């Protein structure tokens, strides 16, 4: 799996990520993976649904992986953060 077809979801507006996914899919990439963790997970789900319902209607969710990542804080303590990967593919 190449790094180019991964979109990391952060704090930007949802439409920024939708545009990134649509641009990649229209550029010939058959599968795009959305990666998010923590509070950005709901934004990743929004991006996937907006892409599927409004822009690329033949795109389907092929896989969803959920996990927990351990993040070290500046003080040295560790926190667990939920993470999600949503795979979108064109038919």
Image: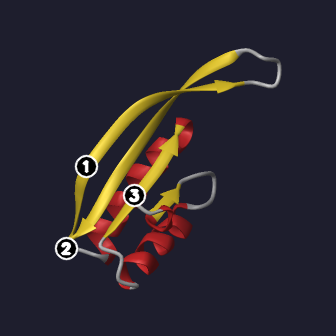
Quarter-of-image position of residue 47: bottom left
54 and 48: which is toward the camera:
48
Q: Residue at x 19, y 73 (%)?
A: 58
Mark 2 and mark 3: span between their CA atoms?
Answer: 16 Å
Say which element carries label 2.
Answer: loop
Q: Which numbered marker is on residue 58?
A: 2
Label 2 and label 1: CA atoms lie apart by 15 Å
Tell me if 77 is positioned left or right of 79 in this view: right
Of the image marks 2 and 3, the number of the one nearer the N terminus: 3
| Disc 2 and disc 1 in contact, CB within 8 angstroms | no
Query: What numbered label is drawn on residue 36?
Result: none
In this picture, is 81 found above or below 65?
A: above
Up the image or down, 43 lies above or below 72; here it is below
Q: Quadrant of the C terminus?
A: bottom left
Residue found at x 33% / y 40%? 65
- Where is residue 25, by image quadrant? bottom left
Label 1 close to label 3 by CB (< 8 Å): no
| Residue density around tag 3, few if under 14, some if 14–19, many if 20 or more, within 10 Å | many
| Label 3: element kind | strand
Which mark sits nearer the N-terminus, 2 or 1?
2
Q: Which residue is farthest bottom?
A: 27
Element type where label 1 sits in the image: strand
Q: Residue at x 49, y 74 (%)?
A: 19
Q: Quadrant of residue 34?
A: bottom left
**Mark 1–mark 3 distance (CA, rounded to whole Å):** 9 Å
Q: Which mark is residue 33?
A: 3
The number of callouts visible is 3
- Mark 2 vs mark 1, foreground winner is 1
Q: Which residue is mark 1?
A: 63
Instruction: Tell me which residue sits at (60%, 51%) in the image.
Output: 10
């Amino acid at each position: 799996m190449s790094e180019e077809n991964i979109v990391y979801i952060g704090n930007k507006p949802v439409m920024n990520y939708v545009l990134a996914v649509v641009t990649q899919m229209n550029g010939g990439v058959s599968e795009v993976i959305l990666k998010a963790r923590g509070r950005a997970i709901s934004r990743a789900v929004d991006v996937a649904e907006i892409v599927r319902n409004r822009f690329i209607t033949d795109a389907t969710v092929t896989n969803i992986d959920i996990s927990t990542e351990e993040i070290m804080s500046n003080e040295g303590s560790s926190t667990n953060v939920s993470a999600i990967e949503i795979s979108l593919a064109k038919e």
